[in-house]
Image (cartoon, coloured by chain):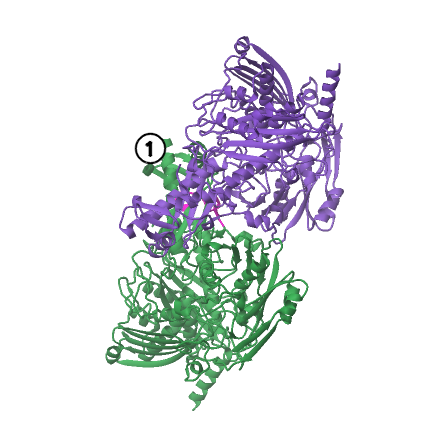
Chain colours: A green, B purple
Amino acid sequence: MPEYSVVGKPLPRIDGKVKVTGQAVYAADLALPGMLYGKILRSPYAHAKILNIDTRKAEKLPGVRAVVTGRDFPGIPFGHMPFTRDQLPLAMDKVRHVGEAVAAVAAIDEDIAEEALDLIEVAYEELPAVFTAEEALKEGAPLVHDRKDGNMLFKANYHWGDVEKGFAQSDYIREERFQTHRATAGFIEPHAVLASADASGRITLQASKQSPYITWRHFCRAMDLPLSKVRIINPYVGGGFSGKHEPFDLDFAAARLSQKTQRPVKIVLNQDEVISFYKQRQHKKSLMKIGAKKDGTLMAVDCKVLAEGGAYANQTAFELWIFCNYTNFPYRLPNLKFEAIRAYTNNIPSGTIYGHGGLAGRYVYESMLSIVADDLGIDQLEFRLKNALRQGDTTAHGQAVDFVTVDQALKQVAEGIQWEEHKANRKPYQGVGFSSVIHSPGTRMGGHHSSTSLVKVVEDGTISLITGCTELGQGCDTILAQIAAEVLGLQLDDVSVATEDSDGAVLEAGMFGGRGTPIGGVSMLKAAEDARMQIAELAAEELQTAPENLEFRDRGIYIKGKDERAMSFQDAARLAYYKKGIPVYGRGYYHIPDVEVHDLYGGGGGRSAKGWASAAHAAKVEVDPETGHVKILKSVGAVDCGQPLNPLLLAGQEEGSMAFAYGLALYEDTKIDEKGRPLIRSLTDYKLPTAAEGIDHTSIHIINPSPYGAFGAKSGGEIFSLLGAVTIANAVKDAIGVRIMDIPLTPEKILKALKEKKDKEAA
Amino acid sequence: MPEYSVVGKPLPRIDGKVKVTGQAVYAADLALPGMLYGKILRSPYAHAKILNIDTRKAEKLPGVRAVVTGRDFPGIPFGHMPFTRDQLPLAMDKVRHVGEAVAAVAAIDEDIAEEALDLIEVAYEELPAVFTAEEALKEGAPLVHDRKDGNMLFKANYHWGDVEKGFAQSDYIREERFQTHRATAGFIEPHAVLASADASGRITLQASKQSPYITWRHFCRAMDLPLSKVRIINPYVGGGFSGKHEPFDLDFAAARLSQKTQRPVKIVLNQDEVISFYKQRQHKKSLMKIGAKKDGTLMAVDCKVLAEGGAYANQTAFELWIFCNYTNFPYRLPNLKFEAIRAYTNNIPSGTIYGHGGLAGRYVYESMLSIVADDLGIDQLEFRLKNALRQGDTTAHGQAVDFVTVDQALKQVAEGIQWEEHKANRKPYQGVGFSSVIHSPGTRMGGHHSSTSLVKVVEDGTISLITGCTELGQGCDTILAQIAAEVLGLQLDDVSVATEDSDGAVLEAGMFGGRGTPIGGVSMLKAAEDARMQIAELAAEELQTAPENLEFRDRGIYIKGKDERAMSFQDAARLAYYKKGIPVYGRGYYHIPDVEVHDLYGGGGGRSAKGWASAAHAAKVEVDPETGHVKILKSVGAVDCGQPLNPLLLAGQEEGSMAFAYGLALYEDTKIDEKGRPLIRSLTDYKLPTAAEGIDHTSIHIINPSPYGAFGAKSGGEIFSLLGAVTIANAVKDAIGVRIMDIPLTPEKILKALKEKKDKEAA
């Protein structure tokens, strides 16, 4: 194992101090001279025609500077793929869900803007609405969109191997239904934007976006603007969890209001609006049929999914592809069939949320595997180890996986959770659950999929990084700084990370799927290497040696084999700028090599990037039979994300993922009334786990460097979000002896299950 | 002459619309959450010991967040050269001029900050002060600084050739005394800064600076911080005229107040403060002795200068070197002796102001030449043409000059002003004056002297420029955009210029001496060429040809010799990003080639950059004998700045320079009372020319491309500021028959001169 001086160390995050002191600037903190405040008027109906919007009274209110409606936009829908471009900046002819934006106001203060909303008169004609996938797909159901496939947005039909043959060869077949629920992304910082249009025709958008690139493209499409007429400056982001990829009504409204008034316009939502009306996890009903040999060898999986994703497509079709992947990862399976339908309804639109697709896939499959193991009388751990993918295996859908260490991870979490002791010495209402997964380090998608970094050497021997990666709390600024510092023999304190700005940086495709380190990290590595090479050439000339004889460490340049420093890095920087007149900019770019673009919607194979991360999770829970409350006694995660670049940050992400999964497994849910109106509208009612839960979690890092990543790093961030929920579901089953098919495992459901079990035992 | 499609066109400036609509953001417009407002307490004394500063009452005023004094800084003086580092952020032990900052307050609003200033109790012990160079240099004069040379900051003593021999060979010798006066820089936007220190130890400085690099270095030195702990973001600057190179008290005060409070602190001065207490042009008394042959051949110049530059050095020593240069440019002269002394006094500090040194040099020399021509009975034009430097000549101080066209320029302005007709048909109180000059396209100075540019190709086929040049109204953003657009076959509308930010850009050494186009322009040219090469390689592969077969024009890529477009530039950009995954960043840097660094203070030769610009100016004035008022009837300028990249912007700079010179020649002046207190303290009393003056100016462009500049460009901005004042002085002499040796040529002086002339004629 190579010795690193910055990489691999548990260093505190470089943005830590400004964040804990409250100094970090988020979108809502921004201000510009002459700035106006915007507010959004929302539909009270789930489905209605907009007959007329009369904004005259609102416009006349003193302090109001402009009002916009859907008619102020070009009517060009945006979305990720041609067939998912179904959304307009603000509703135009009809509204399709409660809370959909129909108008927006800019005024000199927030109170006046709020007051003006009440003066906008919207004439609606209410339409019949649909709220479940089943209703929506019925013949003659009210149409959410006017499309030839009615309310069916997308149908997936994938088949690898021959499931019929697989079932025929099975000794054992079982079929079960599962449900995974709607939930919000749960970020701390609500959506916020400051748009500033100017007389040159350019708009600067400073918004809370985890994927400003996606926002940029969608925004420009729907505004009918070339990319260059929009500048994206991304402030710090207070969490995204895949809830902040795309532009929302507020971004469009602020921009158009700013264009109309020629003044900057800021719109900041509150958490109630976010929880009530913005992107939720897709609701999915799954029917899984599985076949296995008596010895536990998995033979076939047939999975059917019915997905209810609300009024607009977003990335919900892509989610079903991911779901499919995760109905076989990380276990060997020769035959897989997967069918899924995504229905439009008049609910809040769904889309990407942390663990997108994978979480539900793992939930269904790891639940099913636990059932099979129990049915076949095979130990849960042994059963998983038997089927786990090994190095060089190919998944059911033809994806070659490399660098997998699922078996190691499973063994380590079993040891950590004391599986043998648990089995030997079972205590009432205590249970242990397992799950495991592999995760791809980024995929190629539409738009650009490469990463570009620049390293600017400053004359004082420090460096400044220009990156298109977004710091949304995950720590990418720190990781990139560690990579660049290591390459140049510097310390973390020698590195600044520039504000993400589309005028200077090539924005990353987005911060999703754990792309930051494996993709952004490699381009930063290359940029730092390029800078090192430039400095080495100048220093070598001065030191009368060859550049390849030089080593960079301890803020200095050394001639190989000599202990004495030949030149400080600072002197080399001064040499470049002052003596040679040569400024140093290292430039690096990276795109995923040797990987085909996914044929996402055609049922094809495609491959994700190389250098897979592996993880396993085990948790021990105790169920209170009186209250139905589940307490997590212990949680152990093992992850092989190659070389962990910063074990402290990695542990932070793991613990965050755990808390996230805990919330999904036990608490979070949404509810609507008969008119599609959300019943849970604030954090008072929407329960999220907090630090008070105090999960006892242990992180184990398996260090198995990948040649594709910077210093051997793979993807480590999102992986546990895929596992936590099903681990807990499996543990609860182990604790109470019955399985609840639908998360969240609320006290009500648990008490009901315990009662039914008791009744059955009594019967 | 090559045909260009963007370069050389009179295109409107790209920042024009946002500026005329008031949307452009200047430092005073900036705001950050939690921002405090700072105010500065100034010394009422020109020279006094600071015995004590009691800030307790001010600190207790509700709303005050912090107070700082000189004691809050490390006591490290800043300045350009080691021997000119004489200034502290705020005064520490004594004050050396009226208005020197002694303390600063940060409060929640401006009124409270202002009120707090009154509560700061400063105990002074007043010291005897000196206000003229003569007083200052007297034996036993009060010392401004405790230095071994007393009040003599610097003594220049340059001698080339042999002036004694030159005078011996002369048929004619004359000696005259001249005075050039103190004046303010006259920018519209007062000094302003927003400093934001954060818990990570970093300070972001957003200030109105025309040379943020100089500010950065001086600031970091005096704050004892590495460069990387200070980030410079430069907003638009509302004019600089060399008055905004360095950090001032407000920059230091805002930064330290921000560090103390951990909140952003903004300090915005008003024009009264700027006019009263900030950098003024150096006052200079010159004694020039000149020798010539009867035929007008110049033989020798001996020039002695006594400069009064106030309490701190700034760049006033360097100014004397420039002054020296311009006592022979642009005429042949075999022997030159130059002696100068810069004295410290207790006046407002002097420093760089537009035309720094050169203006005074030209004033003295072109005045003297007019006197010589009159004395020898040689036509003013003929006399200048006879002596004008020609291509391949070397100046008196050994500077080889290339690309000079002074003779052409002189002939053209003479024609434009109708010199022959004027002479043939003289009208009472009307006069014509001439002057000419050559100007170097940038020099190398301390710190880095190169220029770095980046061109980022955006996926929509547009480009974004990253430059360290500062847009201060001179139009550099537009010029750089034209250069990059021309190289890549794009239009001006396809170019964005990123905000100047030290985290991304390598800041230029500074915007002075007309460096922007000749230095920054070349690095931008190279960056665009680099981007073109990268795109050409990708496109050539696609088009199955060689990159060198491709031409870039009309937003497209053409195979040489074919009229049909092979690929649009946009498609090439998409090819790079989407298909190849290769983002395109062009990188260019430039440093002045084959040029020695000036031995500025040792009397050595040194050379400036190559590719000299030439200019001549002629003006016709009419003097009102009743009021003494001078009206400029007509002004004609001819400039050879190589290829003018944008004739509209060039004409704008010329007209600005004219107005500037007009003000200096006729109106602007400063006055102090017996205690060194400024008597002219606002724009009400300080007269600047405005558009109402309505000068009838004609610009003539001599197109004589230089191989050193982008598309043949040389330096064109500052050149007329060197000429206008002396042209008018010469014209006034021509009009009234007597010469006034000291500008400004106020009505009082003119009436007095007319009266003296009349009295003499009567006698």
Q: Looking at the image, is A697 positioned above or below residue B338? A: below
Residues drawn in magenta: A485-498
Name the residue at 57% across, 71% down.
Answer: A42
Is B348 in the magenta? no
Q: Looking at the image, is B285 positioned above or below residue A329? A: above
Q: Residue extending furthest front?
A: B425
Instruction: State left or right for residue A405 relative to residue A431.
Output: left
Q: Looking at the image, is A76 positioned above or below residue A536? A: below
**Spot occupied by residue B663 in the image (x, y as percentages of width and height):** 65, 33
Q: Front-most of A191 and A434?
A: A191
Name the residue at 42% across, 48% down.
Answer: B490
**Spot occupied by residue A223 in the image (x, y as percentages of width and height):** 49, 62
Q: Which quarter of the image is occupied by the N terminus of chain B?
A: top left
User: On the image, numbered disc 1 is attached to which residue?
Assistant: A545
**Spot occupied by residue A452 in the image (x, y as percentages of width and height):** 40, 51
Q: Looking at the image, is A504 positioned above or below residue A350? A: above
Secondary structure under badge 1?
loop
Q: Front-most of A237 and B98?
A: B98
Q: Front-most of A38 and B647?
A: B647
Badge 1 density bin: few <14, some 14–19, many ≥20, Cα 10 Å:
some
Can you see residue B198? no
